[in-house]
Image (cartoon, rainbow, N blue to C red):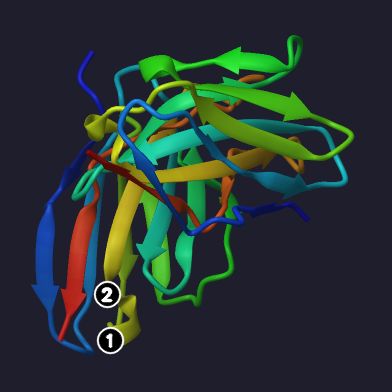
Amino acid sequence: KAGVTQTPRYLIKTRGQQVTLSCSPISGHRSVSWYQQTPGQGLQFLFEYFSETQRNKGNFPGRFSGRQFSNSRSEMNVSTLELGDSALYLCASSLPATASYEQYFGPGTRLTVT
Amino acid sequence: AQSVTQLDSQVPVFEEAPVELRCNYSSSVSVYLFWYVQYPNQGLQLLLKYLSGSTLVKGINGFEAEFNKSQTSFHLRKPSVHISDTAEYFCAVSGLTGGGNKLTFGTGTQLKVEL
């Protein structure tokens, strides 16, 4: 099976712009979660989508949003970018909520805000 | 609320020596525990997981971890490390709180294997 894919892998944006990141989960996985990784804050949960519905949300401002499509692919959007949004954004997919809660991660999108 | 503490930010070790990376968690509900590894410029790869049952869990690449409920710990061990094990290791917890998948990660331990 193909793994989780994320596009683009690298992105450079300017403060105030907006950005959209894409994630394609492993075939058959219906849950997609997003995480932000920075040197200062580490790995932080952004949100999770399942069957096109946001099921769980972390403590991020409303500038961070996401959605999931009927084929389980997901996008996250960050509006009005700030320098502090520079980070590695990781997407993870898993089967429907099962006892294992095992998540498989993509390679990430490295976002640099200048 | 759940939290994970990885006390060691860096662990240097010589090749073929044993290593232990420490992880302690805090949770008011039953949890599932995971160890992930991250190589430079890559995503996270699952090493092993504890769901229930035997407290000694074996994972990939010769790693194992022991769940200790009384000490709320889930330390990762490998009897003999290799240069290729140099990477950052993250302990994570997931719990049955309100449904959904949400991993809470520790701050990571950088394992540096030296010749």
| Quadrant of residue B103 within the rendered picture | top right
Observer-nearest of B55 and B94: B55
Q: Position of residue A43 (x, y in %)?
A: 46, 58
Please, is residue A45 above or below residue A6 in the view?
Answer: below
B49 or B88, nearer to the observer: B88
Q: Which residue corresponds to mark 1?
A: A83
Is A106 placed left or right of B107 in the picture?
left
Q: Amino acid at mark 2?
A: Ser
Q: Chain of mark 1?
A: A
Q: Position of residue B30 (x, y in %)?
A: 82, 33
| Callout 1: SS | helix
Residue A86 disc label: 2
The secondary element bearing badge 2 is classed as loop
Location of the N terminus of chain B by quadrant is bottom right
Q: Residue at position x 48%, y 45% from top?
A: B90
Q: Mark 1 and mark 2 in contact (Cβ < 8 Å)?
A: yes
Query: What x and y, as percent, mark residue B26?
Result: 78, 50
Q: Residue at x 41, y 69 (%)?
A: A64
The quadrant of the image that shows the C terminus of chain B is top left
> Residue at horizontal 76%, vertical 42%?
B97
- Alpha carbon distance from label 2 to label 1: 6 Å
Dot 1 amino acid type: Leu
